[in-house]
Amino acid sequence: MSKTEVHDSATQKNELNEHEQHYFTSYDHFGIHEEMLQDTVRTLSYRNAIAQNKDFFKDKVVLDVGCGTGILSMFAAKNGAKHVIGVDMSSIIEMAKQIVELNGLSDKITLLRGKLEDVVLPYKKVDIIISEWMGYFLLYESMMDTVLYARDNYLVEGGLIFPDKCSIHVAGLEDAKYKNEKLNYWQNVYGFDYSPFIPLVKREPLVDTVENSAVNTTKCKLIEFDLNTVTIPDLAFKSKFKLHTKRQDFINGIISWFDIEFPAPKGKKPVTFSTGAHAAYTHWKQTVFYLEDDLECEPNDVLEGELVCVPNKVNNRDLDITISYNFKAGGPDGKERSRKGKNSYIMH
Ligand SMILES: C[S@@+](CC[C@H](N)C(=O)[O-])C[C@H]1O[C@@H](n2cnc3c(N)ncnc32)[C@H](O)[C@@H]1O
């Protein structure tokens, strides 16, 4: 194992279904990798988590699930790993091969093309799994499934997963101007009525950056996952939330984001990062679910609800999300302002 070897793919792309082909093709082009590499919150968090825990990596066999351009593999190799195996189904791995060679790490890194689920690894077991698998709203793309497959099939007992903790959070959001612009646009497109698009637009969560000042309720952690123990069925979840309004305003939607945490030795602060509106920009931005109602709120009203998230039946990388809400307004006009609703969304 002294050479970086990119054999023919272990997975024949034309045998994958159209959704899978489309998914892996989306990672072929360098542009998407450039965006990820340039996301310094993301990439430096991985580098810090690895570099600050050199003792974990020293002389260990590491598996990089979905290695892309090889950046995480190289971080691990530079920080003492005995050997790193990088696996990716997309053609970008051919570039990773050149990069690894150019940077003198061919002896330390083996690159394998194919789906992680299909490749044969040169080691039966690995000590550490590293992977950047997170999608919008954390779970979009369903790539965590592949990390869990790697854990269950290759990770030694007591091995580490970088990162290993993640959580999804929600809050209320004032965003009337943008919401109305997005919907009203379809009322009159060059003089034509395009309103049949409106229900489709309403069903689509918006991925965009949000000003933190537009968040007008308390925050609520919807769910957390420990990658050491979570199972694929757990990723289809149903969670309740309860938010308290902070000011007189309107709630036009629910904003969501996720937080990430890497392993650290006992007593040492772990590397973490957040993709919330209160934190520095990441390419994941935030995900907004506009509500059918615009909720007129006063301080200390309560927005309770439940969010159900399941992988779409046709394409399991898409997510079907339903938000049921019960807005309980207080004060003399509380009854008129209170609303109940249930809205469905698809992330695709
Ligand atoms: C979000 S990118 C991360 C790339 C790189 N690790 C980085 O941090 O820049 C995820 C990569 O995982 C690959 N991938 C996703 N699912 C995979 C699977 N089941 N088998 C192999 N590669 C996979 C994609 O092709 C993509 O290149």
Image (tube, grey):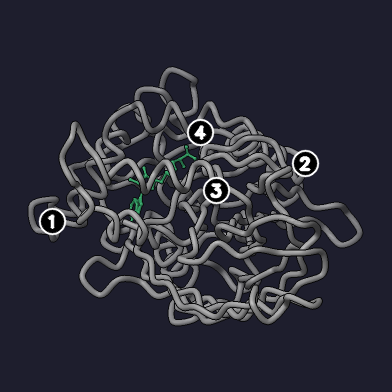
Q: Cβ–Cβ below 8 Å for labels 1 and 2?
A: no
Residue indicated by mark 2: 52
Residue behind label 3 places its C-beta within 8 angstroms of ligand 1: no
Identify the residue shown where x is 76% and y is 72%. 301
Mark 1 belongs to which amino acid? Glu
Q: Is residue 300 left or right of residue 172?
A: right
What amino acid does circle 4 point to? Ile
Q: Earlier in the sequence, mark 1 or mark 3?
A: 1
Q: Nearer the viewer, residue 341 or 230?
A: 341
Looking at the image, is mark 3 or mark 2 earlier in the sequence? 2
The single residue placed furthest to the left in the displayed view is: 14
Q: Which residue is mark 4?
A: 71
Q: Which mark is residue 18?
A: 1
Q: Earlier in the sequence, mark 4 or mark 3?
A: 4
Specify the amino acid type for callout 3.
Answer: Ala
Q: Nearer the viewer, mark 4 or mark 3?
A: 3
Secondary structure under tag 2 reads loop
Considering only order in the chain, which callout, 2 or 1, is on the residue closer to the N terminus?
Answer: 1
- Identity, as a three-letter code, of the amino acid under mark 2: Gln
User: Does residue 57 appear left or right of residue 189 in this picture?
Assistant: right
User: In the rendered image, which quarter is residue 338 located in?
Assistant: bottom right
Residue 322 horizontal side relative to residue 91, left or right = right
Confirm if mark 4 falls within 8 A of ligand 1.
Answer: yes
Q: Out of 297 and 58, give the one closest to the viewer.
A: 297
Could you tell which of marks 1 and 4 lies nearer the N-terminus?
Answer: 1
Q: Residue under circle 3?
A: 176
